[in-house]
Image: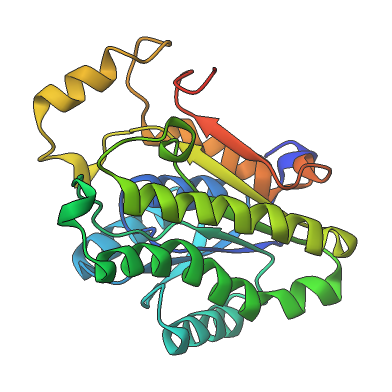
Amino acid sequence: MPSALFDLTGKVVLVTGSSKGLGRAMATALAEAGAKVCMNYYNEPAAAEVALEDMKSRGGQGIMVRASAIDEADIDELVTTCETQLGPIDAVVVNATCDQPHLPIEEYDWDFYQSMLDFFIKSPYLIARRVLPHMKEQRWGRIINIGSEVFQRGVGEFSAYVAAKGGQNGWTRSMATELAPYNITCNMLSPGWIPVERHENDPQDEKDGYRALIPMDRWGVPGDVCGTVVYLASDASSFVTGQNIAINGGMTVA
């Protein structure tokens, strides 16, 4: 049984992009803390089925819903399905992402920049607008954006992703101030490079170079984000809002 401060029993949490990787780990951890979790995917239904069954095998309650995290009609249907099957949403984890190639600015086009803005600004905007009426009515809610250390580090040849994550960070801070009177917190959790399925084909020399810089002298794993996301979704973080918490073994200490 979780400590009372971290106990999410009775809460309904939506986690976008939660069929694999960090999203799957966070959704499972939230379910293990007692929440009913609406998991989400858009591609790879087989992986989504495995993720849901794994969460349930650990005693969790929840559903898996296919929806695009950047399409307004899909978001509306996703939230409606969650509300119908699990109940009104108390907390959201905005995690869905897309491919993020490293390229010099001359090799990006505006369509790619727009795709980054869609995932990291449009998506949290659409989701928040849809779930906030219930949160405001009950005067309790949690919005958790999954950011990235790339904004703090100013990673080169990554301008579209870095710019979008910077915008998401600014949106988080603004919403924290706007929603504070309703007892709704809005925070960002920013992992470092934690190798998951989508990193399987990343160049080994790039992995080795990053790994050599980590002050804690080990790779991060998906489980490293779980305690923090449960904390931010729970009453334990009731006076914490507008913050960007790095989970990267000390990569952004300076």
Asked if one can make out residue 59 in the rendered structure from this viewpoint, the answer is no
- Above/below status of 77 relative to 215: below
Q: How many marks?
A: 0
- Residue displayed at 14% across by 40% down: 200
Q: Is residue 45 left or right of residue 218?
A: left
Question: Which residue is at a point 37% across and 78% down the rendered structure image?
Answer: 67
Residue 245 screen position, x and y as percent = 59, 35
Looking at this rendering, what residue extends furthest in the front direction?
106
Locate the C terminus and report the quarter of the image it occupies: top right
Residue 208's spot in the image, x, y percent? Answer: 18, 18
- x, y percentage for residue 162? 39, 47
Q: What residue sits 89% from the left and 62% below the top?
A: 181
Above or below, comparing residue 1 to residue 187 in the picture: above
Q: Say above or below: 133 vs 189.
A: below
- Farthest residue toward the right? 181
Q: Nearer the viewer, residue 237 or 155?
A: 155
Q: Is residue 181 left or right of residue 171?
A: right
What residue is drawn where x is 51% and y is 45%? 29
